[in-house]
Every structure is written in structure tokens, then in C-alpha cells.
Amino acid sequence: MGEQQKTESSLVEEIQDLLLDTQDVENFLNELARFSAENLSSPRGEVYCGITLLRHHTAATVASSGERALVLDELQYKFNDGPCLRCCREGVQVHIPDLRRDNTFPDYTEVALRQGIGSILAVPFELSGYAARAGLNLYSDSPHAFDQDAVVRAEGFVRQASKGLQLAVLLGQHSQMAANLKSAMESRTIIDTAVGIIIAQNRCSQQEAVELIKAASSNRNVKLREVAAAIVESAGGGRVETHFT
């Protein structure tokens, strides 16, 4: 028991170090995938790892230990079914010890076998309270690569890694919000500048200037920001930039 606690404690520290040592969420997740593949590989064979994130009913591989895992993940998205998708959607572990003797996902199984895969293990992350689901997808060329000990180790690993992934998802949400806010502010700066130019050129009111831009946007079927940018450029204003301090 003491050895197990020591192992889990060490694992927690290594996951925390991964998060602290990487610059952004994408790097963290890729390091996490490589770390998973290395630590779950065994004499039975090399393990390939992908991390699937399911948000708004759309699945994507947000990280992988290499091209092999990425391809194996994306083949499942093509069929809209497979071990990692079942794992994410239902929050259940999916273990296929021998792909040659399993027909749970017939279409995917056929192409995975052609890719040389013998066994698959998909373990769900714990992301309760988040509008996202995720799974750690493990592939091996060898059948029966994930025995009971390997499954238990994978579960323990994911249990600890879930804490890091929760933080990564949270950071990603905040980053997206910040990016959206920055984009909105930049658009507003360009539009306000264009409005000022129209007021000066046409001696009209602010509302009339805004309506002129909206009408041009509608007639040309282009975004307000693009119309405004064209107005500023034609007036010799060049590219408008929003400065953040």
C-alpha cells in the first residue's frame, strides 16, 4: 500500500510538472499524451496515445503521442463510432483485448486491423461540471497488450491526469473568451474609425454613418468589419490596430 501511495504521489508531481513546464494548453496535452504512451508501454509492445475531447457533440484529437495515434483516432471520427467515441460519449471504459476476435465496431475494426492494431484501451477522464468530455485512447500492435495490471495502472494514471486536464480545459475556455473579446474590441475599433470617416466626408450623424456601413455590408454580403476596414484603407488610414495594455 505504501509503495502504491508513493507511486501515485510521484505521478501527481510529474503531471503537475508537465503543466508548469509547458507554455500553453496545447503543449501540455501533447506532453501528457507522450508521457502516457511512454509510461504505459510494456514488454508486450509500444503503446500509442491520443486524447479525444468531445464538445458540443463534436469530437477532436487535441493531442497525441505521434502520427500513428492521431490517424487511429481520426478514423473513428470518420465512422462516427469507435472505442474512444464510445468512451467519451458514455463516460465508460472500453477495452478490446484482441481486435481480431471483436466485432463491437465492425467498420472501425476492419481499418484498425489493416493499420496493424491488435488491442485498444480507452479510459474516460473525469470532467464533471464541464461542458466537455474526454478520453485517453491507447493502442498497441500486440493483442492482449493491456492486462489487468495495465488497465489498473491506466485508470490510476487517468484519475490523476484528469485534474491536469480539467485545468487545461478551464484555461482553454478562458483563452477562447479572451480571444473572442480581443477580436470584438478590434472589430469595434475599425468600425468606429470608419464611422468617423463617413461623418467627416458626408457631414452626417453617427447613426446615419452606421446605417450606411450596415447597408454596404448587406448589399455586398460581407462582414461589417470588412466593409469598415475597406473604408479606412480607401481613406488612406492604413491598417487599424487596437492596442492593449
Image (cartoon, rainbow, N blue to C red):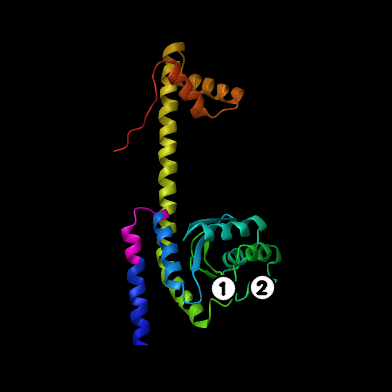
Specify whether 58 is left or right of 1: right
Q: Which mark is residue 219?
A: none
Residue 73 within the segment the image draws in magenta: no
For the N terminus, the quadrant is: bottom left
Q: Which mark is residue 100?
A: 2
**Span shown in magenta:** 16-26
Q: Quadrant of residue 38?
A: bottom left
Name the residue carrying label 1: 142
Residue type, mark 1 in image:
Ser
Residue beneath the point at 51% across and 78% down? 151
- Residue 142 to residue 180: above or below: below
Specify whether 23 is left or right of 89: left
**Distance of label 1 from label 2 (alpha carbons):** 11 Å
**Of helix, strand and loop, which mostly describes the magenta segment?**
helix
Residue beneath the point at 42% across and 15% down? 235
Residue that sits furthest to the left in the current view: 245
> Where residue 82 sits: x, y (%)?
63, 64
> Where residue 228 sits: x, y (%)?
47, 24
Q: Residues within 10 Å of mark 1 (few under 14, many from 20)?
A: some
